[in-house]
Image (cartoon, rainbow, N blue to C red):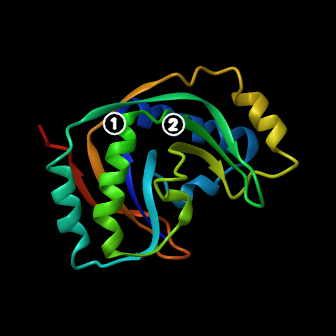
């Protein structure tokens, strides 16, 4: 799977990395290292048209100015594979940016993960996944529950994380938002 994401600003990038290290030290969680870049995702897919994706990303980045996202709380995606995350608040600007990105990239995408469709998208910053279990989730949530996750983060980029099955993700393309 591959993802079109925005990396966090330097200070929040470090804060998330620090949390990841704490979770590894205290609970042995390492699943997050598959995609080792603090970010939130606009879209996750099986594949892109690699001849066109960079051009589309550049086009998008030239029409979006850097903007602020706000986070609000700790959350859990339930089901077979639990994910612990920091929720990103959906405001009108974020929704509009997501629709622009999604609609521009959809024609050059194959196998879009349905959770990233504009009607159901829940923007978030992942803290732990793949190794969160019924046995450790209570202790992990207790460890994180009293932290302040009311953050304001400047978002200034559109980045593609290339992550073939079984491989660690790599940054493939990164474009700064330069719109007016």
Q: Secondary structure at mark 1?
A: helix
- Residue reaching furthest front? 119
Residue located 74% across and 29% down the image: 143
Residue located 45% across and 46% down the image: 40
Can residue 172 be seen at all in this image of the molecule? no
Q: Which mark is residue 70?
A: none
Residue located 56% across and 59% down the image: 115
Q: Quadrant of the rendered structure where residue 23 is?
A: top right
Report whether 137 appears left or right of 112. Answer: right
Graded by Cα atoms within 10 Å as few (under 14), some (14 to 19) or many (20 or more), the crowding at tag 2 reads some
Whole-percent x and y of residue 81?
73, 59
Whole-percent x and y of residue 32?
59, 53
Whole-percent x and y of residue 56?
21, 65
Disc 2 target residue: 16
Front position in the image: 167 or 90: 90
Q: Which mark is residue 93?
A: 1
Whole-percent x and y of residue 122?
54, 46
Number of numbered markers: 2
């Amino acid at each position: 799977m591959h993802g079109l994401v925005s990396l966090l600003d330097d200070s929040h990038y470090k804060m998330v990395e620090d949390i990841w290290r704490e979770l590894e030290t205290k609970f042995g969680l390492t699943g997050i290292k598959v995609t080792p870049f603090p970010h939130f995702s606009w879209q996750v897919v099986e594949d892109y048209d690699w001849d066109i994706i960079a051009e589309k990303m550049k086009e998008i980045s030239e029409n979006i100015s850097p903007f602020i996202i706000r986070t609000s709380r700790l959350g859990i995606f339930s089901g077979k594979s639990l994910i612990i995350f920091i929720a990103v608040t959906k405001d009108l600007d974020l929704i509009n940016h997501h629709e622009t990105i999604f609609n521009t990239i959809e024609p050059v995408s194959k196998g879009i993960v349905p959770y990233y469709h504009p009607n159901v998208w829940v923007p978030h910053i992942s803290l732990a996944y793949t190794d969160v279990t019924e046995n450790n989730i209570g202790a992990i949530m207790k460890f994180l529950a009293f932290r302040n996750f009311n953050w304001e983060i400047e978002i200034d980029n559109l980045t593609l994380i290339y992550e073939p099955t079984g491989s660690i993700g790599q940054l493939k393309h990164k474009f700064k938002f330069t719109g007016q």
